[in-house]
């Protein structure tokens, strides 16, 4: 997975590209670390470039959400591709995330 982080003051946008799976654990930890040192109240993961997501990737997103919540930061997911959106629906991820 590749990612790009943009800090817009009160909101951070993290654009994800490629696939999100077990091998991306360190990248996810790096994102958490990057966000931790900033003053954002909201982080949006832009998923438009995310082509693949597996069950471990879903778990990593939940870990990010829990970490951000402990810092007082809300996480939103935006623009998932059809296949990723379908996986969110199957896994009922709307219970856990704001998906826009």
Image: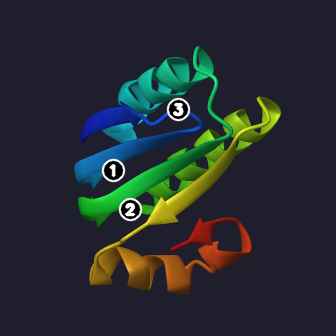
| Mark identifier at residue 84 | none
Task: Describe residue 64's horizontal placement relative to residue 20 as left or right.
Answer: right
Label 2 crowd (10 A; few <14 / some 14-19 / many >=20): some
| Mark identifier at residue 54 | 2
Q: Percent from the top left, x then y, of residue 90?
A: 53, 85
Label 1 crowd (10 A; few <14 / some 14-19 / many >=20): many
Vertical order, 45 against 90 (above or below): above
Precedes in sequence: disc 2 or disc 1: 1
Q: Residue at x 79, y 36 (%)?
A: 72
Q: Are marks 1 and 3 in contact (CB under 8 Å)?
A: no
Q: Percent from the top left, x then y, of residue 96?
A: 70, 66
**Which quadrant would the N terminus be assigned to in this image?**
top left
Q: Percent from the top left, x then y, of residue 5?
A: 35, 33
Which structural element holds mark 1? strand
The answer to which quarter of the image holds residue 32 is top right
Badge nearest the viewer, 2 or 3: 3
Badge nearest the viewer, 2 or 1: 1
Q: Residue at x 43, y 21 (%)?
A: 30
Q: Are marks 2 and 1 in contact (CB under 8 Å)?
A: yes
The residue at which mark 3 appears reads as 9
Precedes in sequence: disc 1 or disc 3: 3
Vertical order, 95 against 55 (above or below): below
The residue at which mark 1 appears reads as 20
Gap in angstroms between the C-alphas marked 2 and 1: 7 Å
Label 3 crowd (10 A; few <14 / some 14-19 / many >=20): few
Gap in angstroms between the C-alphas marked 2 and 3: 31 Å
Which structural element holds mark 3? loop
Q: Are marks 2 and 3 in contact (CB under 8 Å)?
A: no
Which structural element holds mark 2? loop
Task: Describe residue 47's horizontal placement relative to residue 13 as left or right.
Answer: left
Vertical order, 88 against 42 (above or below): below
């Amino acid at each position: 997975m590749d990612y790009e982080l943009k800090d817009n003051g009160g909101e951070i946008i993290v654009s994800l590209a490629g696939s999100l799976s077990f091998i991306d654990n360190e990248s996810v930890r790096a994102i958490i670390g990057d966000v931790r040192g900033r003053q954002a109240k909201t982080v949006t993961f832009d998923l438009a470039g995310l082509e693949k997501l597996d069950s471990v990737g879903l778990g990593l997103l939940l870990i990010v959400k829990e970490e951000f919540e402990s810092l007082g930061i809300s996480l939103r997911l935006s623009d998932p591709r059809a296949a990723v959106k379908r996986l969110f629906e199957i896994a009922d991820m709307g219970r856990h995330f704001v998906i826009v």
